Image (cartoon, coloured by chain):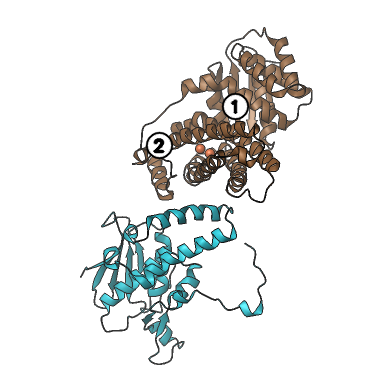
Chain colours: A brown, B cyan
Amino acid sequence: MNNTKTIDVKGLEHAEKEGLIFPSIEELAGGQVLRLIVEFNPVPLVYMLKARGEFDVSFEKEGPDEWILNIKRKSTEKDEKKEQFRELLRDLKEGDQEQAKEKARELLREVDATTLGVMEQELIREGVSHEEIRSSLCDIHLEVMKDSLLAQRVEVSAPHPVNTLMEEHKIILDTLNQLGALVERLEDTGSFDEFGEDREKLKDVSHHLVEAESHHQREEEVLFPVLEAHDIVEPPSIMKMDHVEFRKRKKELYQLSHDSRDIEFPLFKARVTELGKYLTKELGSHIFKEDNILYQIALQVLNEEEWAEVKKGADKIGYCCFTPQDVVR
Amino acid sequence: MAGTKIAETNMKASFRDFLEEVRPLRFQEPLAETLGALVDGGTLEYRFVDVVKMAGHACPTVAGAYLVCEKALEALYPGETPVRGELAVTVYGEPDEGVYGVVAQVFSFITGAAPATGFRGLGHKFKRKDLLKFDPRKPDTEAMSFEFRRLDNSKGVLVKLYPRLIPFPPEKAGRMGRLMEQVLWEAASAEEKREFQELWMEKVRDMLIGRKEIDRWLKIERRD
Ligand SMILES: [Fe+2]
Ligand SMILES: [Fe+2]
Protein backbone atom coordinates (compact mmCIF):
# COMPACT_ATOMS: atom_id res chain seq x y z
CA MET A 1 0.00 0.00 0.00
CA ASN A 2 1.27 3.48 -0.87
CA ASN A 3 1.11 6.16 1.70
CA THR A 4 -2.13 7.42 0.26
CA LYS A 5 -4.97 5.36 -1.12
CA THR A 6 -8.08 6.83 -2.73
CA ILE A 7 -11.47 5.20 -2.82
CA ASP A 8 -14.50 6.66 -4.52
CA VAL A 9 -17.79 5.23 -3.26
CA LYS A 10 -20.11 7.67 -4.99
CA GLY A 11 -23.29 6.07 -6.23
CA LEU A 12 -22.90 2.81 -4.32
CA GLU A 13 -25.55 1.30 -2.07
CA HIS A 14 -25.21 1.94 1.64
CA ALA A 15 -24.09 -1.63 2.38
CA GLU A 16 -21.56 -1.56 -0.42
CA LYS A 17 -20.20 1.73 0.84
CA GLU A 18 -19.78 0.31 4.32
CA GLY A 19 -18.18 -2.80 2.90
CA LEU A 20 -15.52 -0.67 1.21
CA ILE A 21 -15.05 2.15 3.67
CA PHE A 22 -14.67 0.35 6.97
CA PRO A 23 -12.15 -2.26 5.85
CA SER A 24 -10.08 0.39 4.04
CA ILE A 25 -9.96 2.44 7.19
CA GLU A 26 -9.04 -0.49 9.38
CA GLU A 27 -6.34 -1.53 6.92
CA LEU A 28 -4.51 1.75 7.33
CA ALA A 29 -1.13 1.41 8.94
CA GLY A 30 0.35 4.21 11.03
CA GLY A 31 0.96 7.32 8.93
CA GLN A 32 -1.02 6.06 5.97
CA VAL A 33 -3.81 8.16 4.54
CA LEU A 34 -7.12 7.16 3.04
CA ARG A 35 -8.73 9.66 0.65
CA LEU A 36 -12.41 8.91 0.68
CA ILE A 37 -14.71 10.41 -1.98
CA VAL A 38 -18.44 10.41 -1.25
CA GLU A 39 -21.45 12.30 -2.60
CA PHE A 40 -22.81 13.35 0.77
CA ASN A 41 -21.33 14.90 3.87
CA PRO A 42 -20.08 11.84 5.82
CA VAL A 43 -20.95 13.29 9.21
CA PRO A 44 -21.55 10.00 11.07
CA LEU A 45 -18.29 8.56 9.84
CA VAL A 46 -16.32 11.62 10.92
CA TYR A 47 -18.06 11.48 14.26
CA MET A 48 -17.21 7.82 14.77
CA LEU A 49 -13.60 8.25 13.69
CA LYS A 50 -13.11 11.18 16.02
CA ALA A 51 -14.64 9.20 18.83
CA ARG A 52 -12.01 6.52 18.27
CA GLY A 53 -9.18 9.01 18.57
CA GLU A 54 -6.76 6.99 16.42
CA PHE A 55 -7.13 9.09 13.31
CA ASP A 56 -6.48 12.57 12.01
CA VAL A 57 -9.50 13.51 9.97
CA SER A 58 -9.66 16.46 7.59
CA PHE A 59 -11.65 17.58 4.58
CA GLU A 60 -9.91 18.16 1.29
CA LYS A 61 -13.18 19.16 -0.37
CA GLU A 62 -16.57 19.90 1.16
CA GLY A 63 -19.47 19.69 -1.27
CA PRO A 64 -21.60 20.62 -2.91
CA ASP A 65 -21.67 17.44 -4.97
CA GLU A 66 -18.78 15.55 -3.49
CA TRP A 67 -16.84 15.45 -0.25
CA ILE A 68 -13.22 14.32 -0.03
CA LEU A 69 -12.12 13.19 3.37
CA ASN A 70 -8.52 12.50 4.37
CA ILE A 71 -8.22 9.92 7.11
CA LYS A 72 -4.77 9.39 8.53
CA ARG A 73 -3.99 6.79 11.13
CA LYS A 74 -1.93 8.24 13.94
CA SER A 75 -0.07 5.17 15.12
CA THR A 76 0.54 1.57 14.28
CA GLU A 77 -0.94 -1.25 16.35
CA LYS A 78 0.04 -4.88 16.52
CA ASP A 79 -2.49 -7.44 15.44
CA GLU A 80 -1.64 -10.53 17.44
CA LYS A 81 -4.95 -12.29 17.41
CA LYS A 82 -5.16 -12.21 13.68
CA GLU A 83 -5.29 -15.93 13.06
CA GLN A 84 -7.83 -16.47 15.78
CA PHE A 85 -10.06 -13.92 14.20
CA ARG A 86 -9.70 -15.24 10.73
CA GLU A 87 -11.15 -18.50 11.96
CA LEU A 88 -13.89 -16.85 13.89
CA LEU A 89 -15.08 -14.72 11.06
CA ARG A 90 -15.07 -17.70 8.79
CA ASP A 91 -17.23 -19.46 11.36
CA LEU A 92 -19.56 -16.54 11.24
CA LYS A 93 -20.09 -17.36 7.63
CA GLU A 94 -20.15 -21.12 7.72
CA GLY A 95 -20.52 -22.45 11.25
CA ASP A 96 -22.93 -21.95 14.11
CA GLN A 97 -23.79 -18.27 13.77
CA GLU A 98 -24.91 -17.53 17.29
CA GLN A 99 -22.01 -19.31 18.91
CA ALA A 100 -19.46 -17.72 16.61
CA LYS A 101 -20.89 -14.28 17.22
CA GLU A 102 -20.75 -14.78 20.95
CA LYS A 103 -17.11 -15.84 20.68
CA ALA A 104 -16.40 -12.87 18.45
CA ARG A 105 -17.89 -10.51 20.99
CA GLU A 106 -15.72 -11.94 23.73
CA LEU A 107 -12.63 -11.55 21.62
CA LEU A 108 -13.56 -8.06 20.60
CA ARG A 109 -13.22 -6.97 24.17
CA GLU A 110 -9.53 -7.78 23.96
CA VAL A 111 -8.71 -6.90 20.39
CA ASP A 112 -8.51 -3.56 18.63
CA ALA A 113 -10.58 -2.49 15.70
CA THR A 114 -7.66 -2.45 13.28
CA THR A 115 -7.18 -6.19 13.36
CA LEU A 116 -10.85 -6.68 12.93
CA GLY A 117 -10.96 -4.42 9.90
CA VAL A 118 -8.18 -6.30 8.11
CA MET A 119 -10.01 -9.53 8.74
CA GLU A 120 -13.19 -8.11 7.37
CA GLN A 121 -11.47 -6.98 4.23
CA GLU A 122 -10.32 -10.55 3.67
CA LEU A 123 -13.75 -11.89 4.38
CA ILE A 124 -15.16 -9.64 1.71
CA ARG A 125 -12.56 -10.91 -0.73
CA GLU A 126 -13.69 -14.42 0.15
CA GLY A 127 -17.09 -13.46 -1.17
CA VAL A 128 -19.32 -12.67 1.80
CA SER A 129 -22.52 -11.05 0.58
CA HIS A 130 -23.48 -7.51 1.50
CA GLU A 131 -26.46 -8.83 3.41
CA GLU A 132 -24.16 -10.92 5.59
CA ILE A 133 -21.88 -7.97 6.09
CA ARG A 134 -24.81 -5.88 7.10
CA SER A 135 -26.21 -8.40 9.51
CA SER A 136 -23.08 -9.67 11.20
CA LEU A 137 -20.22 -7.30 10.55
CA CYS A 138 -22.22 -4.14 11.02
CA ASP A 139 -23.16 -5.42 14.47
CA ILE A 140 -19.60 -6.30 15.26
CA HIS A 141 -18.45 -2.86 14.22
CA LEU A 142 -20.99 -1.37 16.49
CA GLU A 143 -19.85 -3.70 19.24
CA VAL A 144 -16.26 -2.52 18.79
CA MET A 145 -17.34 1.09 18.81
CA LYS A 146 -19.67 0.69 21.75
CA ASP A 147 -17.35 1.67 24.55
CA SER A 148 -15.89 4.71 22.88
CA LEU A 149 -19.32 5.83 21.71
CA LEU A 150 -20.81 5.41 25.15
CA ALA A 151 -17.91 7.32 26.67
CA GLN A 152 -18.46 10.23 24.27
CA ARG A 153 -22.21 10.29 24.62
CA VAL A 154 -23.69 13.58 25.71
CA GLU A 155 -27.00 13.66 27.53
CA VAL A 156 -29.25 16.66 27.90
CA SER A 157 -31.90 17.40 30.46
CA ALA A 158 -35.66 17.72 30.09
CA PRO A 159 -37.52 19.17 28.28
CA HIS A 160 -34.92 19.02 25.48
CA PRO A 161 -36.32 16.92 22.60
CA VAL A 162 -33.30 14.60 22.71
CA ASN A 163 -34.00 13.95 26.36
CA THR A 164 -37.59 13.02 25.54
CA LEU A 165 -36.53 10.75 22.68
CA MET A 166 -33.92 9.04 24.87
CA GLU A 167 -36.38 8.57 27.72
CA GLU A 168 -38.82 7.02 25.27
CA HIS A 169 -36.05 4.77 24.00
CA LYS A 170 -35.54 3.44 27.53
CA ILE A 171 -39.20 2.52 27.71
CA ILE A 172 -39.21 0.98 24.24
CA LEU A 173 -36.14 -1.07 25.21
CA ASP A 174 -37.94 -2.22 28.32
CA THR A 175 -40.88 -3.29 26.16
CA LEU A 176 -38.48 -5.13 23.86
CA ASN A 177 -37.07 -6.96 26.87
CA GLN A 178 -40.56 -8.07 27.78
CA LEU A 179 -41.11 -9.16 24.20
CA GLY A 180 -37.87 -11.13 24.29
CA ALA A 181 -38.96 -12.91 27.46
CA LEU A 182 -42.37 -13.67 25.97
CA VAL A 183 -40.81 -15.15 22.86
CA GLU A 184 -38.51 -17.27 25.00
CA ARG A 185 -41.45 -18.63 26.97
CA LEU A 186 -43.43 -19.15 23.78
CA GLU A 187 -40.69 -21.37 22.46
CA ASP A 188 -41.41 -23.90 25.22
CA THR A 189 -45.13 -23.79 24.60
CA GLY A 190 -47.28 -26.18 22.60
CA SER A 191 -50.75 -24.62 22.54
CA PHE A 192 -52.69 -21.39 23.03
CA ASP A 193 -53.87 -22.75 26.39
CA GLU A 194 -50.34 -23.29 27.52
CA PHE A 195 -49.34 -19.82 26.37
CA GLY A 196 -52.17 -18.69 28.64
CA GLU A 197 -51.90 -15.24 30.23
CA ASP A 198 -48.89 -14.43 28.13
CA ARG A 199 -51.30 -13.77 25.27
CA GLU A 200 -52.64 -10.77 27.16
CA LYS A 201 -49.09 -9.66 27.85
CA LEU A 202 -48.29 -9.96 24.17
CA LYS A 203 -51.25 -7.68 23.49
CA ASP A 204 -49.86 -5.09 25.92
CA VAL A 205 -46.41 -5.32 24.41
CA SER A 206 -47.68 -4.92 20.86
CA HIS A 207 -49.88 -2.02 21.96
CA HIS A 208 -46.79 -0.29 23.34
CA LEU A 209 -44.88 -0.95 20.16
CA VAL A 210 -47.54 0.56 17.89
CA GLU A 211 -47.89 3.44 20.32
CA ALA A 212 -44.22 4.18 19.66
CA GLU A 213 -45.17 5.29 16.14
CA SER A 214 -45.51 8.86 17.35
CA HIS A 215 -41.88 8.69 18.48
CA HIS A 216 -40.80 7.70 14.96
CA GLN A 217 -43.13 10.31 13.51
CA ARG A 218 -41.47 13.05 15.55
CA GLU A 219 -38.06 11.87 14.39
CA GLU A 220 -39.13 11.78 10.75
CA GLU A 221 -41.20 14.93 10.58
CA VAL A 222 -39.35 17.19 12.97
CA LEU A 223 -35.78 16.11 13.73
CA PHE A 224 -34.70 14.57 10.42
CA PRO A 225 -35.70 17.53 8.22
CA VAL A 226 -33.46 19.82 10.30
CA LEU A 227 -30.57 17.37 9.96
CA GLU A 228 -31.21 17.19 6.24
CA ALA A 229 -31.08 20.98 6.07
CA HIS A 230 -27.57 20.62 7.51
CA ASP A 231 -26.65 18.26 4.69
CA ILE A 232 -26.92 15.21 6.90
CA VAL A 233 -29.04 13.18 4.54
CA GLU A 234 -27.88 9.59 4.51
CA PRO A 235 -28.34 8.64 8.21
CA PRO A 236 -31.93 9.92 8.44
CA SER A 237 -32.83 8.10 5.26
CA ILE A 238 -31.46 4.83 6.66
CA MET A 239 -33.34 5.37 9.92
CA LYS A 240 -36.52 6.02 7.93
CA MET A 241 -36.08 2.77 6.02
CA ASP A 242 -35.69 1.02 9.37
CA HIS A 243 -38.95 2.58 10.58
CA VAL A 244 -40.76 1.17 7.55
CA GLU A 245 -39.39 -2.31 8.26
CA PHE A 246 -40.36 -2.05 11.92
CA ARG A 247 -43.87 -0.81 11.11
CA LYS A 248 -44.58 -3.82 8.88
CA ARG A 249 -43.52 -6.21 11.60
CA LYS A 250 -45.19 -4.36 14.44
CA LYS A 251 -48.40 -4.44 12.48
CA GLU A 252 -48.24 -8.19 11.96
CA LEU A 253 -47.32 -8.78 15.60
CA TYR A 254 -50.18 -6.53 16.70
CA GLN A 255 -52.62 -8.39 14.48
CA LEU A 256 -51.40 -11.77 15.70
CA SER A 257 -51.71 -10.73 19.31
CA HIS A 258 -55.21 -9.30 18.85
CA ASP A 259 -56.81 -11.88 16.68
CA SER A 260 -55.32 -15.32 16.68
CA ARG A 261 -58.67 -17.10 16.39
CA ASP A 262 -58.19 -18.03 12.76
CA ILE A 263 -54.62 -19.18 13.04
CA GLU A 264 -53.21 -22.56 14.04
CA PHE A 265 -50.91 -22.46 17.04
CA PRO A 266 -47.74 -23.67 15.28
CA LEU A 267 -48.01 -20.89 12.71
CA PHE A 268 -48.82 -18.34 15.42
CA LYS A 269 -45.77 -19.46 17.34
CA ALA A 270 -43.50 -19.38 14.31
CA ARG A 271 -44.60 -15.89 13.26
CA VAL A 272 -44.52 -14.35 16.73
CA THR A 273 -41.09 -15.85 17.34
CA GLU A 274 -39.68 -14.54 14.10
CA LEU A 275 -41.19 -11.08 14.47
CA GLY A 276 -40.26 -10.87 18.12
CA LYS A 277 -36.67 -11.81 17.47
CA TYR A 278 -36.36 -9.37 14.61
CA LEU A 279 -37.81 -6.48 16.56
CA THR A 280 -35.83 -7.06 19.75
CA LYS A 281 -32.60 -7.24 17.81
CA GLU A 282 -33.07 -4.67 15.07
CA LEU A 283 -35.11 -2.08 16.94
CA GLY A 284 -32.66 -2.40 19.81
CA SER A 285 -29.71 -1.68 17.57
CA HIS A 286 -31.61 1.13 15.81
CA ILE A 287 -32.10 2.78 19.18
CA PHE A 288 -28.43 2.36 20.03
CA LYS A 289 -27.40 4.04 16.78
CA GLU A 290 -29.77 6.93 17.39
CA ASP A 291 -28.78 7.49 21.02
CA ASN A 292 -25.07 7.23 20.37
CA ILE A 293 -24.55 8.50 16.86
CA LEU A 294 -27.48 10.27 15.24
CA TYR A 295 -28.72 12.28 18.21
CA GLN A 296 -25.12 13.04 19.16
CA ILE A 297 -24.47 14.48 15.73
CA ALA A 298 -27.68 16.46 16.02
CA LEU A 299 -26.55 17.85 19.38
CA GLN A 300 -23.33 19.03 17.76
CA VAL A 301 -24.92 20.50 14.66
CA LEU A 302 -28.22 22.11 15.64
CA ASN A 303 -28.27 25.50 17.33
CA GLU A 304 -30.56 26.55 20.14
CA GLU A 305 -33.11 28.15 17.86
CA GLU A 306 -33.35 24.99 15.82
CA TRP A 307 -33.87 22.92 18.96
CA ALA A 308 -36.65 25.30 19.99
CA GLU A 309 -38.30 24.67 16.61
CA VAL A 310 -37.85 20.91 17.01
CA LYS A 311 -39.44 21.10 20.46
CA LYS A 312 -42.39 23.05 19.07
CA GLY A 313 -42.87 20.63 16.21
CA ALA A 314 -42.66 17.64 18.56
CA ASP A 315 -45.26 19.17 20.89
CA LYS A 316 -47.60 19.64 17.95
CA ILE A 317 -47.37 15.99 16.95
CA GLY A 318 -47.81 14.83 20.51
CA TYR A 319 -46.27 12.04 22.52
CA CYS A 320 -46.74 8.35 23.22
CA CYS A 321 -49.03 7.11 25.98
CA PHE A 322 -45.91 5.96 27.81
CA THR A 323 -43.91 9.18 27.48
CA PRO A 324 -43.31 10.48 31.00
CA GLN A 325 -45.31 13.70 31.24
CA ASP A 326 -42.70 15.47 33.33
CA VAL A 327 -40.02 15.25 30.64
CA VAL A 328 -41.98 17.05 27.93
CA ARG A 329 -43.01 20.09 29.94
CA MET B 1 -57.69 3.01 -0.74
CA ALA B 2 -58.55 2.32 -4.36
CA GLY B 3 -62.01 3.20 -5.55
CA THR B 4 -64.40 0.28 -5.59
CA LYS B 5 -67.33 -0.38 -7.84
CA ILE B 6 -70.62 0.16 -6.08
CA ALA B 7 -74.06 -0.98 -7.02
CA GLU B 8 -76.30 1.50 -8.83
CA THR B 9 -78.68 1.70 -5.86
CA ASN B 10 -75.82 2.70 -3.57
CA MET B 11 -74.70 5.64 -5.64
CA LYS B 12 -76.35 8.17 -3.35
CA ALA B 13 -74.54 8.87 -0.11
CA SER B 14 -76.56 7.40 2.71
CA PHE B 15 -75.82 9.14 5.95
CA ARG B 16 -76.97 8.08 9.36
CA ASP B 17 -80.35 9.62 10.05
CA PHE B 18 -79.26 11.84 12.90
CA LEU B 19 -76.64 13.55 10.73
CA GLU B 20 -79.46 14.74 8.46
CA GLU B 21 -81.43 15.97 11.45
CA VAL B 22 -78.93 18.55 12.66
CA ARG B 23 -80.28 22.12 12.45
CA PRO B 24 -78.96 23.69 9.22
CA LEU B 25 -77.24 27.07 9.01
CA ARG B 26 -78.64 29.59 6.57
CA PHE B 27 -76.85 32.45 4.81
CA GLN B 28 -77.30 35.24 2.38
CA GLU B 29 -74.53 35.00 -0.15
CA PRO B 30 -74.11 38.31 -2.00
CA LEU B 31 -71.40 36.91 -4.24
CA ALA B 32 -73.60 34.09 -5.49
CA GLU B 33 -76.42 36.58 -5.93
CA THR B 34 -74.29 39.07 -7.87
CA LEU B 35 -72.99 36.44 -10.21
CA GLY B 36 -76.39 34.93 -10.71
CA ALA B 37 -76.15 31.55 -9.08
CA LEU B 38 -78.83 32.50 -6.58
CA VAL B 39 -82.08 34.02 -7.77
CA ASP B 40 -83.36 37.14 -5.99
CA GLY B 41 -83.73 36.73 -2.29
CA GLY B 42 -82.50 33.17 -2.31
CA THR B 43 -80.41 31.94 0.58
CA LEU B 44 -77.82 29.21 0.98
CA GLU B 45 -78.34 26.40 3.40
CA TYR B 46 -75.33 24.70 4.97
CA ARG B 47 -76.27 21.41 6.55
CA PHE B 48 -74.09 19.28 8.76
CA VAL B 49 -73.97 16.59 6.07
CA ASP B 50 -72.51 19.19 3.70
CA VAL B 51 -69.71 19.68 6.18
CA VAL B 52 -69.28 15.91 6.35
CA LYS B 53 -68.90 15.88 2.56
CA MET B 54 -66.29 18.63 2.74
CA ALA B 55 -64.33 16.96 5.56
CA GLY B 56 -64.86 13.44 4.31
CA HIS B 57 -65.97 12.25 7.74
CA ALA B 58 -67.85 13.16 10.89
CA CYS B 59 -66.04 13.33 14.21
CA PRO B 60 -66.20 15.27 17.48
CA THR B 61 -63.87 17.93 16.02
CA VAL B 62 -66.00 18.55 12.95
CA ALA B 63 -69.14 18.49 15.09
CA GLY B 64 -67.55 20.92 17.55
CA ALA B 65 -66.56 23.29 14.75
CA TYR B 66 -70.10 23.24 13.38
CA LEU B 67 -71.55 24.05 16.79
CA VAL B 68 -69.03 26.87 17.29
CA CYS B 69 -70.24 28.44 14.02
CA GLU B 70 -73.86 28.05 15.03
CA LYS B 71 -73.22 29.68 18.40
CA ALA B 72 -71.30 32.61 16.88
CA LEU B 73 -73.91 33.22 14.16
CA GLU B 74 -76.80 33.21 16.63
CA ALA B 75 -75.06 35.80 18.78
CA LEU B 76 -73.91 38.03 15.93
CA TYR B 77 -77.08 37.90 13.83
CA PRO B 78 -80.03 37.74 16.25
CA GLY B 79 -83.21 37.57 14.17
CA GLU B 80 -81.28 38.13 10.94
CA THR B 81 -79.94 35.88 8.22
CA PRO B 82 -76.13 35.89 8.46
CA VAL B 83 -74.23 37.15 5.45
CA ARG B 84 -71.58 34.89 4.00
CA GLY B 85 -68.23 36.59 3.44
CA GLU B 86 -69.03 39.28 5.96
CA LEU B 87 -67.25 37.61 8.86
CA ALA B 88 -63.62 37.59 9.90
CA VAL B 89 -62.51 34.59 11.90
CA THR B 90 -59.49 34.20 14.14
CA VAL B 91 -58.43 30.71 15.13
CA TYR B 92 -56.32 30.78 18.28
CA GLY B 93 -53.88 28.06 17.38
CA GLU B 94 -51.48 27.16 14.60
CA PRO B 95 -52.57 25.66 11.27
CA ASP B 96 -50.55 22.49 11.81
CA GLU B 97 -51.31 22.18 15.50
CA GLY B 98 -53.66 19.44 16.68
CA VAL B 99 -57.01 19.70 14.93
CA TYR B 100 -56.97 23.48 14.35
CA GLY B 101 -56.47 23.03 10.62
CA VAL B 102 -59.57 20.87 10.28
CA VAL B 103 -61.64 23.27 12.40
CA ALA B 104 -60.49 26.18 10.24
CA GLN B 105 -61.56 24.35 7.09
CA VAL B 106 -65.04 23.92 8.51
CA PHE B 107 -65.22 27.63 9.37
CA SER B 108 -64.07 28.57 5.89
CA PHE B 109 -66.56 26.27 4.26
CA ILE B 110 -69.47 27.59 6.28
CA THR B 111 -68.72 31.31 6.65
CA GLY B 112 -66.73 31.94 3.47
CA ALA B 113 -63.84 33.43 5.48
CA ALA B 114 -60.80 32.05 3.71
CA PRO B 115 -57.08 31.93 4.53
CA ALA B 116 -54.37 33.28 2.19
CA THR B 117 -55.53 30.96 -0.58
CA GLY B 118 -59.02 32.49 -0.77
CA PHE B 119 -60.76 34.61 -3.37
CA ARG B 120 -59.13 38.02 -4.02
CA GLY B 121 -62.48 39.65 -4.75
CA LEU B 122 -64.03 41.52 -7.66
CA GLY B 123 -62.67 45.01 -7.55
CA HIS B 124 -63.26 46.30 -4.04
CA LYS B 125 -65.92 43.71 -3.24
CA PHE B 126 -66.25 40.11 -2.16
CA LYS B 127 -62.74 39.65 -0.91
CA ARG B 128 -62.61 36.38 1.05
CA LYS B 129 -58.86 36.02 1.24
CA ASP B 130 -57.20 36.53 4.64
CA LEU B 131 -60.52 36.73 6.44
CA LEU B 132 -59.51 33.63 8.35
CA LYS B 133 -56.37 33.97 10.41
CA PHE B 134 -54.45 31.89 12.89
CA ASP B 135 -53.07 33.40 16.06
CA PRO B 136 -50.92 31.24 18.37
CA ARG B 137 -51.63 33.41 21.44
CA LYS B 138 -54.39 31.41 23.10
CA PRO B 139 -56.69 33.38 25.41
CA ASP B 140 -57.54 30.22 27.39
CA THR B 141 -55.20 27.23 27.61
CA GLU B 142 -57.98 24.79 28.48
CA ALA B 143 -60.18 25.75 25.55
CA MET B 144 -60.03 25.96 21.78
CA SER B 145 -60.88 29.64 21.23
CA PHE B 146 -62.18 31.39 18.13
CA GLU B 147 -63.13 34.95 17.40
CA PHE B 148 -65.87 35.79 14.89
CA ARG B 149 -66.26 39.44 13.89
CA ARG B 150 -68.82 41.06 11.61
CA LEU B 151 -67.13 43.30 9.09
CA ASP B 152 -70.19 45.51 8.60
CA ASN B 153 -70.59 46.62 12.22
CA SER B 154 -67.38 45.25 13.78
CA LYS B 155 -69.28 43.45 16.50
CA GLY B 156 -67.41 40.37 17.67
CA VAL B 157 -67.67 37.30 19.85
CA LEU B 158 -65.18 34.92 21.35
CA VAL B 159 -66.37 31.30 21.29
CA LYS B 160 -64.62 28.73 23.44
CA LEU B 161 -64.88 25.00 23.00
CA TYR B 162 -63.71 22.75 25.86
CA PRO B 163 -63.31 19.31 24.25
CA ARG B 164 -62.38 17.67 27.54
CA LEU B 165 -65.63 18.78 29.20
CA ILE B 166 -67.90 17.14 26.65
CA PRO B 167 -69.57 14.40 28.67
CA PHE B 168 -68.82 10.86 27.56
CA PRO B 169 -68.58 7.88 29.92
CA PRO B 170 -64.90 7.19 30.61
CA GLU B 171 -65.32 3.45 30.10
CA LYS B 172 -66.76 4.11 26.65
CA ALA B 173 -63.98 6.55 25.88
CA GLY B 174 -61.40 3.97 26.94
CA ARG B 175 -63.04 1.26 24.90
CA MET B 176 -63.22 3.59 21.90
CA GLY B 177 -59.50 4.36 22.16
CA ARG B 178 -58.57 0.69 22.25
CA LEU B 179 -60.87 -0.14 19.37
CA MET B 180 -59.57 2.76 17.33
CA GLU B 181 -56.03 1.42 17.64
CA GLN B 182 -57.23 -2.01 16.50
CA VAL B 183 -59.11 -0.48 13.58
CA LEU B 184 -56.12 1.59 12.49
CA TRP B 185 -53.73 -1.37 12.66
CA GLU B 186 -56.28 -3.54 10.86
CA ALA B 187 -56.68 -5.94 13.75
CA ALA B 188 -60.38 -5.41 14.47
CA SER B 189 -63.01 -8.02 13.71
CA ALA B 190 -66.20 -7.01 11.88
CA GLU B 191 -68.07 -6.74 15.19
CA GLU B 192 -65.31 -4.69 16.77
CA LYS B 193 -65.32 -2.36 13.79
CA ARG B 194 -69.07 -1.90 14.12
CA GLU B 195 -68.81 -1.35 17.85
CA PHE B 196 -66.17 1.29 17.26
CA GLN B 197 -68.32 3.08 14.67
CA GLU B 198 -71.31 3.04 17.01
CA LEU B 199 -69.31 4.57 19.85
CA TRP B 200 -67.80 7.16 17.57
CA MET B 201 -71.19 8.16 16.20
CA GLU B 202 -72.70 8.12 19.67
CA LYS B 203 -70.28 10.81 20.71
CA VAL B 204 -71.02 12.87 17.60
CA ARG B 205 -74.76 12.45 18.14
CA ASP B 206 -74.46 13.43 21.81
CA MET B 207 -72.82 16.67 20.72
CA LEU B 208 -75.03 17.61 17.79
CA ILE B 209 -78.43 16.32 18.91
CA GLY B 210 -78.25 15.57 22.65
CA ARG B 211 -76.22 18.69 23.47
CA LYS B 212 -75.93 17.53 27.05
CA GLU B 213 -74.32 20.13 29.35
CA ILE B 214 -73.50 22.19 26.27
CA ASP B 215 -73.23 25.40 28.30
CA ARG B 216 -70.30 23.89 30.14
CA TRP B 217 -68.28 22.98 27.06
CA LEU B 218 -69.31 25.66 24.59
CA LYS B 219 -69.08 29.22 25.87
CA ILE B 220 -69.40 32.61 24.27
CA GLU B 221 -68.51 36.13 25.29
CA ARG B 222 -68.94 39.45 23.54
CA ARG B 223 -65.88 41.13 22.15
CA ASP B 224 -67.10 44.39 20.73
FE1 LIG C 1 -35.88 6.00 14.84
FE1 LIG D 1 -35.91 6.59 18.03
Q: Is residue B218 visible?
A: yes
Q: Residue at x 48, y 52 (%)?
A: B178
Q: Image height check: is A310 above or below B161? A: above
> Does label 1 or label 2 sit earlier along the sequence?
1
Work out whether residue A112 or residue A135 is closer to the camera in this orientation and state it.
Answer: A135
Q: Is residue B114 visible?
A: no
Which label sits on residue B60?
Answer: none
Q: Image height check: is B95 above or below B110? A: above
Within 10 angstroms of label 2, few (less than 14), some, or many (20 or more) residues? Answer: few
Q: Residue furthest bottom?
A: B40
Chain of the residue that carries numbered disc 2 in the rendered image: A
Chain of the residue that carries numbered disc 1 in the rendered image: A
Quadrant the C terminus of chain B occupies: bottom left
How many numbered marks have been drawn onto this rendered protein structure?
2
Q: Is residue A94 left or right of residue A47?
A: right
Quadrant the N terminus of chain B occupies: bottom right
Which label sits on residue A69?
Answer: 1
Asked if labels 1 and 2 share a chain, the reply is yes
**What residue sits right under mark 2 in the picture?**
A303
Secondary structure at numbered mark 1: strand
Picture quadrant of residue B210: bottom left
Q: Tell me where residue B23 appears, x and y as whole percent.
A: 38, 78
Q: Residue at x 49, y 31 (%)?
A: A291
Q: Amino acid at mark 2?
A: Asn
Q: Tell me where residue A88 appears, x and y as whole percent.
A: 72, 16
Secondary structure at numbered mark 2: loop
Picture quadrant of residue A104: top right
Q: Residue at x 69, y 36 (%)?
A: A13
Picture quadrant of residue B148: bottom left
Q: Image height check: is A100 above or below B121? A: above
Q: Is residue B13 left or right of residue B203?
A: right
Q: Tell me where residue A109 appears, x and y as whole percent.
A: 59, 14
